[in-house]
Image (cartoon, grey):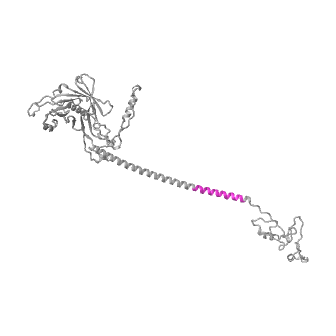
Amino acid sequence: MIDENLPTFHLKPSSDNVKHHASVLLSQYGSDPVPTYSLRHPDPALPGSKNRYAVALYDSYNPDIIYGEVLLIPEWSQPSLSQEEIRRNGGVPPAPQPILPSSFVVQLYNPDQQVLVQQGVSKWSATPQWVFEMPQQSFRQPSVSSIDRTQSDPTASENTPKLRFKWKKDGKLSKDYACSLCGKSTNLDGSKKKNKEPDITLSFFKHLREITMYEPNLSRVEMEDPKGLEVVILLSAIVIREVYNGQMRETFNVSDAARCLSGERPPRKDSADRTNRQRNNLPPNLVPPSLPSQQPLVQNPTSNVRPPPTDPRSQWEIDAETARLRKQIEQEERERRRREHAETERVKKMLEKEEQRARQKQLDIDRETERLKREFEREQRQMQRQTKPALPTRPNASLQPNLATSSYPQPPFQRPHSVSPYHTPSPYMQPAGTAASSSVFFHGPSSGARPPDGRRVRAKPSFFNRLAHPDHAGQRLSKKQSAVF
């Protein structure tokens, strides 16, 4: 602070904890700083505040009163047409970069007036400087004439005399600026600049934080609107600090090119979460009572709609977003085809495994069937071998050679009913094998045949026996008697 008795404006953060708001405090004669003005910037999250800079000076007690504002839209560099840079940038031309403007306009209200501030360079020290002009007469003269009322305001007339002011940096390495009134030329034609009055210092801007008005020299400025001069000095100093001594990307709210290409959005902090954190940090006895919940206000659906692009940067962001979405769609399509191909291969392998498993199962079934079949045949042969009876021994195997190989069991030897006294006569015929083996009529009596009691039976003579044995010819044949009658 140069002198505590001089009016000094202090730039401080706003008391409402809004990042894009600030307060201008005034102190004089050693008093405590009191709020005088309120600085407001547009919300960086709104689409309408992209790629531009704006600041307005309001009254600190009545927020509806605005004194002046500055709107600054930068120029943009031309995009590069190099294919190598476009290829390195992912198929999109490089983003246009903002160009620092060399002038800006301060808009004053009541009365309306536009003050053009132009940037230049000092010839002697090569330090930057900003020059602006303001009319000496800003208000109309009171008049009852209707003709005077139809005339334009003095601020818009070219015939109104103007005063020239200049912001100049103290040095190349210094951060202090001084605003002065340029001296008038003493020549009548104003051609020779060496014959002019010296500059009159009006204010100092120390360390980009304090603006001190040199009140003794302000009375030497011949102007009708000293309040307008004060507003122009404050707004021009703030623009010099934020635009020409700050980061252009943050000042003009330029989105990051890498974030635009990747589609990321910066996270937004909710004011409610910040309020809750502040309430949690307070002691229990200082926590204010919670307000009753209110219904949310109905917002206009068209308020957040982004305006059409008015600068190359916005158009580039739209083109970059379109290219990013197209690239994302192509990537998703490739990923979908890759997943479909992987799913097809997986199903194909699964079917092959199922077929291989089915073939292996069928081979196991066939192998088990063959094994069971062999085991069943083996058990069947063993069972046949165990249940088959042994053939009986025959007393005279030489008389029946043709029956020795028969697979059926032969009954015991029996005599024919006609010659056996021990058999009960039967009107039925005997089996062929039995008759053939026990016939006496054709073969004669067997010497080995005996009745059950063991007595030897004498063979009766027959007609054929007499032919076969001549020694029985002398024996007499007797008529056989009926065994029934």
Q: Position of residue 403 (x, y in %)?
A: 77, 68
Front-most of 473 and 365? 365
Residue beneath the point at 59% across and 55% down: 364
Magenta stretch, main secondary structure, is helix
Give residue 120's quadrant in the image.
Answer: top left
Residue 168 at least partly seen: no
> Does the magenta segment cover residue 379?
yes
**Front in this rendered view, residue 82 or 302:** 302
Image position of 198 with respect to 357: above or below: above
Placement of 426 over or under 158, stated as above or below: below
Question: Left or right: where does residue 277 sit relative to residue 439?
Answer: left
- Work out whether 8 lies above or below 148: above
Q: Position of residue 481 (x, y in %)?
A: 89, 74
Residue nearer the viewer, 120 or 388: 120
Magenta region includes residue 313: no
Magenta stretch: give its range: 362-384
- Residue 250: x percent and y percent? 29, 37
Quadrant in the picture for residue 108: top left
Toward the viewer: 435 or 423?
A: 423
**Residue at the farthest left position:** 188
* In this picture, residue 473 sits left or right of residue 186: right
Query: Image check: 184 left or right of 333?
Result: left
